[in-house]
Amino acid sequence: MDTFDVLIVDDEADFRDSLLKRLKKRNLNVSGAGSGEEALAVLKEEPVDVVILDVKMPGMNGIDTLSAIKRLRPLVEVIMLTGHANVEVAMEGMEKGAFDYLMKPMDIDELLYKLQDACKKKRLNEKRERPVAPRSGSAA
Amino acid sequence: MSPIRRLISRLSGKKRDRSLGENELAELRAAFASRYHHFKLLLSANNKALEIMSEMEKALSGDRSFSMSFVRSQSTAVAVNVFSIVKNLDELAPDKYAELYERLKAIREGINETLAAKRLPEGDRMVAQLSEIGRDMAGLVGSKMANVGEMAGALELPVPDGFALTSAAYQRFMEETNLQAEIDRRLQSREGENLGDLYALSSEIQNLIVSTPLPEELSKAISVAYTELEERTHKGVTVSLRSSALGEDGSDTSFAGQYRSVLNVSGDNLDAAYKEVVASKYGLHAIVYRQNRGIRDEDVAMCVGVMAMVHAVSSGVTYSRNPLDAKDDSVIINSVWGLPKSVVDGSVAPDTFVVSRDPVRISRRDIRVKAQKFVCYPEEGVCRMDLTGKEKSVLPSLDDDHVTALARIALNLEAHYGAAQDVEWAVGPHGTIYLLQCRPLKQITAENGRKGLPESGSAIISGGGTASPGAAAGEVFVIRKSSDVLRFPKGAVLVAEQALPRWAALLSEAAAVVTEQGSLAGHLANVAREFGVPALFGVPGAVGLLENAGLVTVDADGCAIHRGRVEEVLSNARAGRKNLMEGTAVFEALKAVVQWIAPLNLLDPDAPAFKPKNCRTLHDITRFCHEKAVSEMFAFGREHHFSERASKQLYYKVPMQWWIINLDDGFDKDVPGKLVPLENVVSVPFKSLWEGINAEPWQGPPPVDTRGFMSVLLEASANPNLDPSMPSQYANRNYFMLSKNFVSLTSRFGFHFCSVEALVSARQGENYASFQFKGGAADLNRRVRRAHFVADVLEEFGFRSEIKDDGVFARVEGHPEALMEEKLIVLGYLLMHTRQLDMVLANDSAYATHRAKMVGDLTRILAARPPKPGPPPEEKEAARLAAEGE
């Protein structure tokens, strides 16, 4: 798969930087943001295909950031990546349109595959005549 | 209406619209590509969900230890993947199965309830005075302090004055400072790391705790309690701080020595010392210990006992009965000069006194050379090992009066608690006995007589004492310093000079333990017994003699170490290690949560009950969605009129009875018309499957014994599906759905239903092949027999298989491409050659003959495969099949 643009949003600078480096080595265009607010600012300015988003962050939390991203850029795919193993929070994220909810520690190759799958989904959605809104999971 | 539905409604029911413009064609292709991508995402989530379920079930079999982090993260991951499955199915068939979201919601609520159960501290006061504590207060002050309070109060035994910092204090510290959330996050993120990384994590968490200021109210409460203690004792009294964790020292799990005590602390250092004790909850061996024993992190609240220091002349541990032999009711007293630290951590070999209980009389004295003693000086923080002096080191550390007095106290405690006790004590400067703690003693039932040594006299050393019974073999690994812990190889024999508590972290990895010094009373011995690891302590010269010995057999029962692996000794040893997880809180939590996840109730897709509303577990949902996704993809591919994606008949020399739906990139180019030549199919798993199908000519139906044939006839008349005049589910043809890296085959060979699904690509972790085989014309007995036969052959080639009635479900996953191709060849071969096998599987000898033939064939076929690219497979068999038709 060709290269694409990834934004890592995590308040833990060490984690963010090391993931950034490792993904860059795999030829992705990667940038980082330390908070939800910062991430939204980046999304307004730069092209992003897939966002890797932490759940627990000071300020705007991951779930709120996810909703804001989906409002701002409905086609951008969001992968939650967190140390927070909680079924309810994970389900909330999925219902709000997250592509996946992954838990640290994450194998880098597996993460790369997830990123590729998410990006492919975005590309396919872009080709369709109009973007498809994320379905709400609470359909009944 | 979604774009794809609009397109389809335009296309369906009429011949292909030849006036489709380029734009519309492009749009249609995009819609199909998107659809296929959803299908692929569904399969990948399906695969992952099944993998996690099987991991959870494997964990329940108890051969490994796991923590609550494992339970939580696996539950979360499986729920996320199942959500993803439902969502992608919803994309393939919008709103058709929307009811599944509700089922999913109900199930995950069940999961949440199971995981959320949390124990609250009893009461909310942060400080409890020793004088008001009794044994019923273990939930507030931990069992260690509850017992100390009981000794002081109800039993009026001499105990140093003091107070306890309660579980409520701990809770406030962890929650008001957000420490708990941060610790949980770090533990979760680093789950499954090796001991070395865990070591780093452990010190990170401990530093975090030590550097976090106490909530002001707690700090103030500690200082007030200390001032009151000063008033009751004397100004500037120094104190000891000891861990008294909830659940610590229970009779099932003695957390022997896992936590820290801080001695000789002055009033202005209480906060720091308190945090140090709390931090020891996350010491390396404590983390590993909890994990190995299935103790939930959140169930361990660290209460701390604060007691005035006793400046001990001598001290030690009393067992009210022999811990190593349940039939021996002698009281055993281990004693050293100075504080009891050196007897507990095994660094000094103690004097041992054996006292008969009725009448109380000393029956044996074992006076050792105690060259060192552990002492604390009144100046803050100074505690060290001192030389005892040549003359004093050989003297008994207790006189006879003290020995009998201590024995009587232990017997009183035993009577009071109604069970054998382990009592720690110190003798003050004026000869007063102070009791420091007591806890239930776990005794081992010793076997009658020692096992005789093997004749060969292969013992490298004999001697020492049985610290933990049993025998085990392994390579010797000598541990000298803490960093050696990180290099310790799993399954090795731990050899060390001293039996230090910090080696306890290795007990889940070690085959056996041998030390030169250390008493059977020490923490390491306790933990070894609890883990069922054979241990031999006090073996003189063990380190030097064993250093380069390589593989040895430690016979802890026979007090000897033999060169090499001595089966005779090993088989003599008592039953192996216990399943340490079973019955623990973590194990029970996993067991409860798995009930919502792994059981499969929806077995038969043709049954009327195969409906969303009957999905009771995540596995049910997974199974349902997979079935529906495949049939949605299939029906769609077959029915619409978009030529590029319509089903095509496979052509090899002649049109064959195989139909192919290209989902994406399964052909090397656009193939117009209704036939697809074999050479245009470039699907990797398809090609391997095809190779297997054609690898060996089919011998025709095997000779049938009369009963077999009768059985087929009877079944045929009883089963409407076999009546050619009835509309039947068996009237389907053989269909492949495929792409470059994917194949799904649904096939009816005669009376047999069969399906294969496989993903083979460079993404090794996602590779899998699954196989289902069911039905047949013979009676149930023979069909079941054949199911076992197929499972048996598949297991020979590395598949995991499961049999339900006459069906076989087999799976293999995670192998690199080349190996996956071999697995598909095996499946292809079986597809062809198990047809009608049920007719010959009437007896064991037929079973064995056919099994040997098939395994032999397959082994030969796989061995003969040249490295890629291979020659074109022999395809005449497929041609035959084509001629046979349906």
Image (cartoon, rainbow, N blue to C red):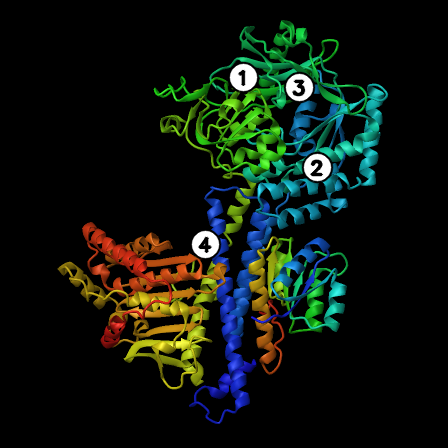
Residue that carries the numbered disc 1 in the rendered image: B321
Q: Is there any visible trace of residue B724 in the rendered image?
A: no
Marks 3 and 2 sit apart, C-alpha to C-alpha, by: 23 Å
Q: Residue at position x 70%, y 48% from top?
A: B181
- Asked if badges 1 and 4 are on one and the same chain, I answer yes
Marks 4 and 3 sit apart, C-alpha to C-alpha, by: 53 Å
Residue that carries the numbered disc 2 in the rendered image: B279
At which x and y percent is residue B17? 46, 91
Residue that carries the numbered disc 4 in the rendered image: B599
Q: Residue at position x 46%, y 65% from top?
A: B761
- Asked if badges 2 and 4 are on one and the same chain, I answer yes
Marks 1 and 4 sit apart, C-alpha to C-alpha, by: 47 Å
- Asked if badges 4 and 3 are on one and the same chain, I answer yes
Q: Mark 4 belongs to which amino acid?
A: Pro
Marks 1 and 3 sit apart, C-alpha to C-alpha, by: 19 Å
Find numbered disc 3 in the image and state the secondary structure of the residue it sits on. loop
**Does the CB distance between marks 2 and 4 fall below 8 Å?**
no
Classed neighbour count for the residue bearing mark 2: other residues with Cα under 10 Å, few (<14), some (14–19), many (≥20): many
Q: Which chain carries label 2?
A: B
Find numbered disc 4 in the image and state the secondary structure of the residue it sits on. loop
Mark found first going from the N terminus, 3 or 2: 2
Residue nearest the viewer, comparing B133 with B812:
B812
- Asked if badges 1 and 3 are on one and the same chain, I answer yes
User: Image height check: is B792 above or below B608?
Assistant: above
Left or right: residue B623 compared with residue B720: right
Q: How many marks?
A: 4
Q: Residue at position x 62%, y 81% from top?
A: A130
Q: Mark 2 belongs to which amino acid?
A: Ala
**Does the CB distance between marks 2 and 1 fall below 8 Å?**
no
Spot the residue most to the bottom: B19
Q: Mark 1 lies on which chain?
A: B
